[in-house]
Image (cartoon, helix red, strand yellow):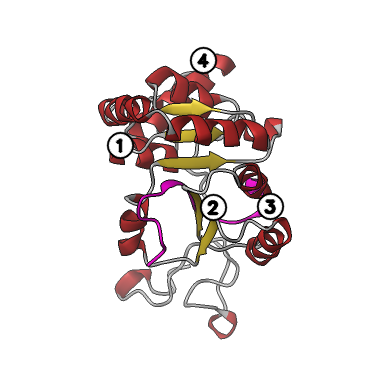
Amino acid sequence: SLGLEGKFVAGYVGTHGLAHALETLLDAAALLRDSPHVRIVLLGDGARKEALVARARELGVDGNVIFVDSVPKSEVARYWSLLDVSIIHLRRTPLFETVIPSKLFECMGMGIPVLHGVAGESAAIVEREGAGWVFEPENAGALAALVRGLRADPAALAACRARCLAGAGRYDRRALALARSRADARRRGGRVGRRVATRPPRRRASARCSRASTRRGRCSARLCGCDLRAPGPRRGSC
């Protein structure tokens, strides 16, 4: 229904926000006007969605850029399957150099090559695993050149799909979180993985608790921990 049969499809799936600078994708689409068999799909919603649709009309690329509204989570995989390559993009700023978008690992798990416009740690993963191609954030010319080149190189895409699937298993979210915690701890000179049990400081019991001013059954003085709802000796024990 999207008219993608026989087309080379590059797609972005996710939030259309200020941080994502999706105008770069529209500018790349403008540079690809001479490639009628290329389509760029943007699926999702966000603060910039209406502005992006208007911008596509201004650039005259509403024919080769397809906007799709958000769909139920159960249907997202079907749209991922339409893509030849996935575009991941964030604004060019040092703030995002430590950000690792989770969709990178989703793409790897589905064998979808990535065109990665995010600098820093996540770009290093893409290059190390051969999971796609990295381009400078907000560089529409570089993105357009990658799309045009990969459409003409199905062998490179096939090899990249295989590398994505092979590398996906190395990126369990819990293992990544622990590795990052250990790296942070090493930089601080501390340790990770060892928890020291501590007791909270004991509170002095209040002289009395006023049942008339209690809230949610707790002592209004908040000093004794008295639970007025509890049966037996604990009720009003302060």
Classed neighbour count for the residue bearing mark 1: other residues with Cα under 10 Å, few (<14), some (14–19), many (≥20): many
Quarter where residue 103 is shown = top left
Q: Amino acid at mark 3?
A: Leu
Q: Which of the two residues, 217 or 55, is positioned nearer the viewer here? A: 55
| Residue bearing the label numbered 4 | 186
Identify the mark nearer the N-term, 2 or 4.
4
Left or right of 95? Residue 208 is left
**Mark 2 to mark 4 CA distance (whole Å):** 36 Å
Point out the stretch of residues depicted in magenta. 1-22
- The residue mark sitting in front, 3 or 4, is 3
Classed neighbour count for the residue bearing mark 3: other residues with Cα under 10 Å, few (<14), some (14–19), many (≥20): some
Classed neighbour count for the residue bearing mark 2: other residues with Cα under 10 Å, few (<14), some (14–19), many (≥20): few
| Residue bearing the label numbered 2 | 203
Identify the mark nearer the N-term, 3 or 4.
3
Identify the mark nearer the N-term, 2 or 3.
3
Q: Which of the two residues, 168 or 197, is positioned nearer the viewer here? A: 168
Instruction: Say which quadrant the N terminus sits in.
Output: bottom left
Q: Is residue 195 visible?
A: no
In the rendered image, the residue lying farthest to the right is 58
| Residue bearing the label numbered 1 | 111
Identify the mark nearer the N-term, 1 or 3.
3
**Mark 2 to mark 3 CA distance (whole Å):** 48 Å
**Residue lying at 34% horizontally and 27% vertically, measured from the top left:** 160
Left or right of 224? Residue 8 is left
- The residue mark sitting in front, 1 or 4, is 1
* Secondary structure type for disc 1: loop
**Residue lying at 46% horizontally and 67% vertically, measured from the top left:** 226
Q: Amino acid at mark 1?
A: Gly
| Residue bearing the label numbered 3 | 18
Q: Is residue 26 magenta?
A: no
